Image (cartoon, rainbow, N blue to C red):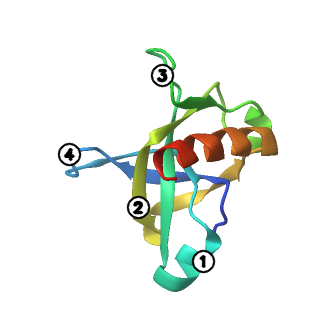
Amino acid sequence: MIYKRWDIIAVHFPFLEGIDAKRRPALIISADRLYSEHSLYWIAMITTAKSGQRPKDVAVTNLERAGLPEACVIRVPRLATVSDQQIARRLGDLIPKDRNAVSALLKQSVP
C-alpha cells in the first residue's frame, strides 16, 4: 500500500540508539515524491506524552479522524526514515489545522 503525506500510521518507530524499535503511531511528513523516487517515508513520532507536553509538540485535535484511541501529541523533533515494510497499517489522517502547526514547526528546523 502507498501512504500519503499527513497519513497517521502504525509503525515500528526506531529508538534513538538505533538498536530496537517500538510499534507506535506516527505521522508521515514527507512529500509523496520521496516514496515514488526512493520507496521511503519521513515520519514524526506520535505519543501520549503522559510525562507532559514539550514546546515543539503538536496536539492531535481530532482523535477520531486520526484513528487514535486517546489524547496524543506529534513530537515534531523526533523524526525517522522508514520503508513501507516497517508500516503495519494506516490509522487515519491529520486535520488541516494540525497539519499547519506541524508544517510551521518543521519550517523552523528545516528552512
Quadrant where the N terminus sits is: bottom right
Question: Camera-side residue: 88 or 106?
Answer: 106
Give the residue type that dot 3 points to.
Arg
Give the residue type that dot 1 points to.
Arg
Q: Which residue is mark 3?
A: 54
Task: Pick whichever of labels 4 and 3 is earlier in the sequence.
Answer: 4
Mark 4 or 3: the one toward you: 3
The residue sitting at 64% across, 24% down in the picture is: 71
Task: Pick whichever of labels 4 and 2 is earlier in the sequence.
Answer: 4
Where residue 23 sits in the image (x, y, percent)?
43, 46
Give SS at disc 2. Answer: strand
Question: Camera-side residue: 109 or 75?
Answer: 109
Q: Which residue is mark 2?
A: 81
Neighbour class for label 1 at 10 Å: few (<14), some, many (≥20)?
A: few
The residue sitting at 61% across, 31% down in the picture is: 58
- Cα distance, mark 2 to mark 1? 14 Å
Q: Which residue is mark 4?
A: 17
Where residue 107 sits in the image (x, y, percent)?
56, 48
